[in-house]
Amino acid sequence: MPLQNLNHLLVLARDLEATRDFYVNVLGLTVGQRPSFKAPGYWLYLGDKAVVHLAEQNSDTRYAGTGPVDHLAFEATGLKEMVTRLEEQAIAVRHCKVPDLGLHQVFIQDPNGVTIELNYSAAEGAEFEI
């Protein structure tokens, strides 16, 4: 059975509420329905799909010792608006151009140190100096 797509990523949050606020207020995900698990947490949706699951770090032994997540990557539009939002919230931004793929990438970190990669078209990133 071949893989079809990535279902979701789980981020173990040191501060669950601050992490939820980051993904909602900065990236625009929405809090949605989540099963009534024993451990506190949230499921964050992109449209109708729960793509980021949050759980309180050390609250459930099922997640102990699973290791770090290096980064999450999203395709995105509205680069100028996102950069403005990040500046307003004093979030450090690193830009990268990938000409071979026609991409302008923005890298930020969530409150747990997980890197978020936002991929925009090179055309949207043309005005940004690197």
Image (cartoon, rainbow, N blue to C red):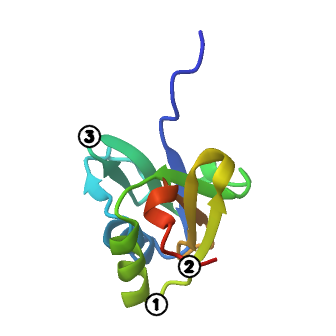
Quick one: 44 or 78, which is closer to the camera? Answer: 78
Tell me which amino acid carries mark 1: Ala
Where does residue 68 sit, x and y in percent of width and height? 71, 58
Q: Which residue is mark 2?
A: 93
Residue 89 in view, yes or no? no
The residue indicated by pointer 1 is 90
Q: Amino acid at mark 2?
A: Val
From mark 3 to mark 2, how far is it between C-alphas? 28 Å
Label 3 is placed on what type of residue?
Asp
How far apart are labels 3 and 1 at the CA level?
A: 29 Å
Left or right of 27, for residue 116:
right
Marks 3 & 2, CB-CB < 8 Å contact: no
Q: Quick check: can you spot residue 110?
A: yes
Q: Quadrant of the C terminus?
A: bottom right
List the residue tagged with mark 3.
48
User: x and y percent of residue 110 in the render?
Assistant: 53, 72
Q: First in sequence, mark 3 or 2: give its number.
A: 3
Residue at image position (36%, 52%) is 43
Quadrant of res 104: bottom right
